[in-house]
Image (cartoon, rainbow, N blue to C red):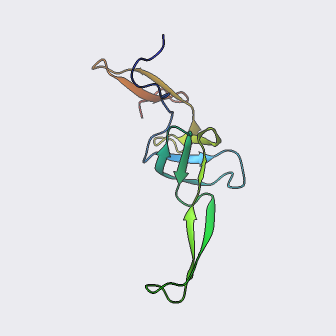
């Protein structure tokens, strides 16, 4: 069944989740998600994929500088870290006691 209004796919991560990078140059690093771009399926994780940008001198900044910032990575390159155990896990959705869909850890079965 196709969605009528919100055509974006639900993602397995949310802002504030602790994730571990499972592929790429930053493999093995952990950090919190600070930003999500759902259209491009990319996320920004603090301390991961650090990039440098050279800023020209200006009136406000006569020295110029080299700024470091976290670049985005694809959402498929991260796994959610279970807050209870500290291990990476896959995410599922099921109804809680109140009948609302909630995410749960597939390793432990507990709600996240």
In this rendering, position of residue 86 left or right of residue 4: right
Towards the viewer: 77 or 86: 77
Estimate the x, y position of residue 108 in percent, counting from the top left.
51, 30
Question: How many numbered marks appear?
Answer: 0
Judged from this view, the residue extending furthest toward the top is: 1
The residue drawn where x is 59% and y is 47% is 20
Towards the viewer: 17 or 37: 37
The residue drawn where x is 54% and y is 89% is 63
Q: Is residue 12 above or below residue 94?
A: below
Judged from this view, the residue extending furthest toward the bottom is: 62
Estimate the x, y position of residue 9 in percent, counting from the top left.
50, 27
Towards the viewer: 74 or 26: 74
Q: Is residue 47 above or below residue 32?
A: below
Q: Is residue 13 above or below residue 8?
A: below
Estimate the x, y position of residue 92 in percent, counting from the top left.
50, 25
The residue drawn where x is 45% and y is 87% is 59
Q: Is residue 38 above or below residue 49?
A: above
Towards the viewer: 46 or 68: 68
Judged from this view, the residue extending furthest toward the front is: 59
The residue drawn where x is 54% and y is 47% is 43
Estimate the x, y position of residue 89 in percent, counting from the top left.
57, 35
Of the 4 image quadrants, the one containing the C terminus is top left
In this rendering, position of residue 68 left or right of residue 6: right
């Amino acid at each position: 069944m196709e969605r009528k209004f919100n055509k974006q796919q639900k993602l397995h991560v949310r802002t504030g989740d602790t994730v571990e990078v499972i592929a790429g140059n930053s493999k093995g690093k952990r950090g919190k998600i600070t930003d999500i771009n759902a259209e491009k399926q990319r996320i920004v994780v603090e301390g991961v994929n650090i990039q440098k940008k050279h800023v020209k001198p200006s009136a406000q900044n006569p020295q110029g500088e080299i700024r470091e910032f976290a670049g985005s990575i694809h959402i498929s390159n991260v796994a959610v870290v279970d807050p209870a155990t500290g291990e990476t896990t896959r995410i599922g959705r099921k109804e809680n006691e109140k009948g609302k869909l909630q995410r749960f850890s597939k390793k432990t079965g507990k709600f996240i």
